[in-house]
Image (cartoon, rainbow, N blue to C red):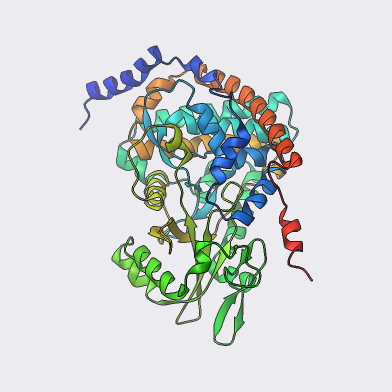
């Protein structure tokens, strides 16, 4: 047990790190003398070839969508900045759109981080920098005034700083038990407008479970439910709407049912016995490919429709996991399975994780992780937020990130000691975020130029969907 002396020495350890890396050093944007298009091409290698243009088509919509899809670029750049030498498990892709609502195992609606494809050991401030820069990039896109955008950065950092100080004074078990539920948020706000929004969010999330998805995504054909094709978003790999080329290794599998069963058995082996028992009550009806997100487009992702003996559905999502962009640029222990990396990082950082979260290998040896599809998932609608609501959302994101870092690392004392009580870190990250947003806009222009010149091919969802229309 830490004594008061131990606690103070840990805090002083974090504070002492400032001698080597002062907080003002975090204003540096890093190694930006590179070709952003080349980094995107590296990140697109190994993806489904005909879907890579869709990835670029989604990224070209705005500098913010470009930012969402280009985590590899910022990870590369951050590797050229000083770091606080307090590495912990980080999200790795901590932008504002990767926060939202989802169901806990007890069916409460939590607000938390919800994307861990890039999770890996790394400097804790990398997450904070990606988050604050995302508010500047998005704020500019939404045409907020400079003062409003600057305030968003301050709200994120101050909230992170204050909450980390709180977690530094809590026992680790209390930190692990801490959950940010929508009910808790409602109880802590005096604003009728915010309570009304939270209530509407809870109502919307309740409609986003497997049973509500069944008629939207599938149809009954005889005795089985079949997922409907809606290319390019959803299609059967061997169906007439497939976007897989005949040369793809998945197209050469002779017995797809046997290959899938083998992979599913490996997944079951990563679950606890009670979860395996629960899944034994379901029968697989159909499997289809689903395109997800912005940065993940082109990686392999399957949705699995299962039905229990009462005709009730369960949608699982099996998503490919590749090397974390953080691990590319920050030395960390070797990873034996990328899907396991995602699952274990998610379990460390989230207050509560999906009961079906596990990992496996695909038919050709690729790494995957598995979870429920869209289980009461609720995404922030920042376009509909005024500056005050956006500011509250920024502070909430700072709180969530502090809780995730404190829980995953047990190093709240050290991080809080480094941050201190002043605005030194907030001032540095304001300078960083504005300078890096400028860099993002320059990179976006280079990216758009590459798409226009033909170096990259970009296609929209509507454009690809037209290929399948009569």
Question: Does any portion of residue 190 appear in the rendered image?
Answer: no
User: Above or below — where is 271 with respect to 444?
Assistant: below
Q: Residue at x 62, y 47 (%)?
A: 380
Seen from the viewer's position, the closer of residues 23 and 31 is 31
Quadrant housing the N terminus: top left
- Res 334 → quadrant: top left
- Res 383 → quadrant: top right
Q: Residue at x 53, y 41 (%)?
A: 188
Q: Residue at x 69, y 30 (%)?
A: 441
Seen from the viewer's position, the closer of residues 168 and 277 is 277
Judge from the rendering whether residue 179 lies leftward or rightward of residue 70; answer left or right.
left
Q: x, y (%) of residue 397? A: 54, 38
Seen from the viewer's position, the closer of residues 374 and 284 is 284
User: Above or below — where is 345 with respect to 286?
Assistant: above
Seen from the viewer's position, the closer of residues 60 and 381 is 60
Question: Does any portion of residue 344 appear in the rendered image?
Answer: yes
Q: x, y (%) of residue 330? A: 41, 32
Quadrant housing the C terminus: bottom right
- Res 72 → quadrant: top right
Judge from the rendering whether residue 317 lies leftward or rightward of residue 215; answer left or right.
left
Residue most extreme to the top = 19
Residue most extreme to the bottom = 222
Count of number-bearing discs? 0
Q: x, y (%) of residue 464? A: 72, 59
Residue most extreme to the right = 470
Q: x, y (%) of residue 454? A: 73, 43
Judge from the rendering whether residue 94 lies leftward or rightward of residue 50; answer left or right.
left
Q: Residue at x 44, y 42 (%)?
A: 119
């Amino acid at each position: 047990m830490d004594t008061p002396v131990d606690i103070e020495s840990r805090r002083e350890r974090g504070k002492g790190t400032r001698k080597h890396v002062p907080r003002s050093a975090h204003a540096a944007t890093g190694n930006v003398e590179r070709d952003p298009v080349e980094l995107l091409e590296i990140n697109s290698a190994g993806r489904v070839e005909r879907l890579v243009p869709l990835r670029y088509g989604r990224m070209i919509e705005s500098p913010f969508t470009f930012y969402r899809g280009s985590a590899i670029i910022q990870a590369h750049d951050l590797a050229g900045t000083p770091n606080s030498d307090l590495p912990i498990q980080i999200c790795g892709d901590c932008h504002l759109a990767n926060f939202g609502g989802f169901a806990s195992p007890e069916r409460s609606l939590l607000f938390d981080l919800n994307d861990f494809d890039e999770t890996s050991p790394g400097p804790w401030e990398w997450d904070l920098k990606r988050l604050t820069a995302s508010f500047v990039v998005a704020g500019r896109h939404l045409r907020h005034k400079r003062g409003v955008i600057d305030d968003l950065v301050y709200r994120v950092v101050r909230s992170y700083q204050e909450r980390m100080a709180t977690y530094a004074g809590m026992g680790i078990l209390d930190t692990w038990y801490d959950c940010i539920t929508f009910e808790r948020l409602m109880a802590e706000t005096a604003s009728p407008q915010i309570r009304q929004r939270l209530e509407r969010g809870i109502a919307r999330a309740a409609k986003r479970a497997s049973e509500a998805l069944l008629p939207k995504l599938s149809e009954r054909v005889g005795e089985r439910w079949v997922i409907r094709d809606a290319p390019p978003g959803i299609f059967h790999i061997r169906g007439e709407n497939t976007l897989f080329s005949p040369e793809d290794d998945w197209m050469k599998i002779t017995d797809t049912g046997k290959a899938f069963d083998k992979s599913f058995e490996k997944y079951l082996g990563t679950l606890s016995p009670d979860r395996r028992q629960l899944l034994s009550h379901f029968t697989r009806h159909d499997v289809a490919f689903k395109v997800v997100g912005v940065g993940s487009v082109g990686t392999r992702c399957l949705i699995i429709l299962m039905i229990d003996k009462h005709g009730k559905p369960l949608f699982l999502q099996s998503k490919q996991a590749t090397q974390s962009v953080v691990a590319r640029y920050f030395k960390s222990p070797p990873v034996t399975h990328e899907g396991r990396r995602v699952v274990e990082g998610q379990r460390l950082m989230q207050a509560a994780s999906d009961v079906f979260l596990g990992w496996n290998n695909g038919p050709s040896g690729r790494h995957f992780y598995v979870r429920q599809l869209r289980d009461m998932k609720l995404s922030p609608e920042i376009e509909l937020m005024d500056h005050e609501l956006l500011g509250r959302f920024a502070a909430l994101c700072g709180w969530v990130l502090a809780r995730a870092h404190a829980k995953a690392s047990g190093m709240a004392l050290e991080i809080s000691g480094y941050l201190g009580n002043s605005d030194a870190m907030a001032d540095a990250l304001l300078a960083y975020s504005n300078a890096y947003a400028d860099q993002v806009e320059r990179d976006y222009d280079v990216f758009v130029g590459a798409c226009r010149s033909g170096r990259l091919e970009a296609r929209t969802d509507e454009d690809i969907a037209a290929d399948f229309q009569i």
